[in-house]
Image (cartoon, helix red, strand yellow):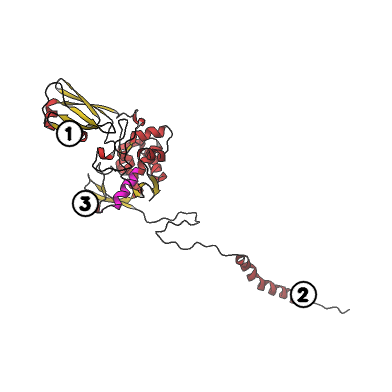
Amino acid sequence: MRTILVNPISFVVAILAVVILLIPSLVVLPYRAGPVNKIDSIPVNTTEKVNSPKPIKGKVVEVAVYRAALAKTEKLPIDDYLVGVVAAEMPADFELEALKAQALTARTFIMKRMKGPQDTGLPGGAIVSDTVDHQVYKNKNELKKIWGSEYEWKLNKITAAVRATSGQIITYNDEPITASFFSTSNGYTENSEDYWANKFPYLRSVKNPWDEDSPKFLHQKLVLIKDFEKILGVSIKGKSIGVIKARTEGHRVKEVSIGSKVFTGREIREKLDLKSSDFTWVKKDEYIVITTKGYGHGVGMSQYGANGMAKKGKTYEEIIDFYYKDVKIKRM
């Protein structure tokens, strides 16, 4: 048998050469075993979901608000605006679910407003004012002055309510509703057409037992008879003040006659600056004592009622479904 001698140096060099040639293939082969996963580029305005740990952020919606006391228009992100509205419109010590319901009505209001005609008649291109004509709004500096040492926890709670409903609005037939609200009912909410001119199918009267503990449920006001007569342009003789001729489905005064004049309950409420259009009255000495039940126009969501529902364990979705008929909560 012939023995073949191998040069050790040549053998090592040959092995190294083979390894160097194989390494690129070994690196590439595992990634060619199947299709490559990738995330395609996504248009800015799409709602398509992608497998990404971070949300895709679109353009921030801004609200132009006319600050009436300052006589100037400010633009701010919608969630900052909503925090300032909820803080101004509902007590921060209300239940979180009630605050969420308030945030939802506020967002629905502003989105409906922004979808409508942009010529609002307000200065500086503002969409809304910061007054009761639209929605009351307070910025953080104003809230600090109002809340003082309670500022941090109150702001955090309201911010949590706004974020929990982020992007949600109340719709009817896929359109944002007129999300009206008020402080306290008289035990019922009001049909929209019984207070305003328009009839909305989702603003229907409902029996509302959740307001009994509201500090604004009952109120009395004294009006001098001479002032009463002057304001309404009537003359009060004898014991009779007037006759309530009809009430609404929401148990508020629909029509009342005083002498030869006939007024709506809303007219009496506004002329005499009453808390509600559910009123009764009696004469006492030189005064007329007017007792009202509830606080506000009565159409839509009762704020104290919403809080009463939340205390009983109702969610903000259940609160919305109770006060607005046949609506859906959808994303903007």
- Residue 106 among magenta residues: yes
Which residue corresponds to mark 3?
123
Q: Quadrant of the N terminus?
A: bottom right
Q: Quadrant of residue 197?
A: top left
Residue 123 visible (yes or no) = yes
Q: Are marks 2 and 3 in contact (CB under 8 Å)?
A: no
Please state if 275 lies on the left or on the right of 59 as rendered. Answer: left
Disc 2 target residue: 8
Write down the quadrant of residue 254 in the picture. top left
Instruction: Check disc 3 and report its element: helix, strand or loop.
Output: helix
Marks 2 and 3, the one that precedes in the sequence: 2
Q: Which residues are magenta?
A: 105-123
Q: Earlier in the sequence, mark 1 or mark 2?
A: 2
- Badge 2 element: helix
- Residue 49 on the magenta segment: no
Residue 93 seen by the camera? no
* Spatial CA span between label 2 and label 3: 93 Å
Q: Position of residue 251 (x, y in %)?
A: 28, 31
